Amino acid sequence: MNPYIGIFYGSDTGCTEEVTHELVEYWESGEVKVIECNQLTKADFKEFDFLILGLSTWYDGDLQSDWEDFFDDFKTIDFTGKTVAIYGLGDQIGYGEYFVDGIGILAEEILNNGGHIIGEWSTKGYDFSESKALKNKDFFYGLALDEDNESDLTANRLETWVTAIKKEIEEIKDKNLVKA
């Protein structure tokens, strides 16, 4: 298996792309490979044990367009043995009933297909009414970002989240070494 971490993202307006570039900078290592969703194949998912997926949620809870186009294939991917983290952009004020739904839509398929999700993120400090991204009432399945209303918080949230998932990945690697 490739030692890299696959970072797969889709971006219509460039916001998710910018966040992805920031994420890569915070990673501070050469062990990531970034692929835009419009270039993804099912084979790309087989190449990595660790995946980070990024997307935005549009309108009334729709996936970003490239993820929407790939979604039928995505639902058939075997995530057994894969560890996945998800970050998503949404608008908690204008679309508070659909805030970062894309995170939850992808998380559901990952879990249904045998994957393990890391990088849960606290709901504290957000103002939304509903979200498919909720793991439970206190946590999202992944990092929730609101570039429309809280772009000033993005850098700190992203850096904190990257640090946390790096630690989770190292713990998983250490456990797998012990088992071997």
Image: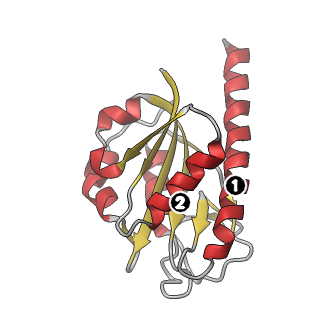
CA gap between label 1 and label 2 equals: 11 Å
Vertical placement of residue 4 versus 103, above or below:
above
Direction from residue 28 to residue 112 in the image, left or right: left
Q: Position of residue 90 (x, y in %)?
A: 50, 73
The amino acid type of the residue labelled 1 equals: Glu
Q: Position of residue 177 (x, y in %)?
A: 69, 17
Q: Position of residue 36 (x, y in %)?
A: 36, 49
Q: Nearer the viewer, residue 159 or 94?
A: 159
Q: Residue at x 52, y 29 (%)?
A: 4
Q: Position of residue 69 (x, y in %)?
A: 25, 57
Disc sitting over residue 20 in the figure: none
Direction from residue 122 to residue 98 in the image, left or right: left
Direction from residue 2 to residue 77 in the image, left or right: left
Helix, strand or loop status at disc 1: helix
Q: Nearer the viewer, residue 162 or 62?
A: 162
The amino acid type of the residue labelled 2 equals: Val
Disc sitting over residue 19 in the figure: 2
Q: Nearer the viewer, residue 96 or 108?
A: 96
Disc sitting over residue 159 in the figure: 1
Mark 2 is surrounded, within 10 Å at the Cα level, by few (under 14), some (14 to 19) or many (20 or more) other residues, namely: many
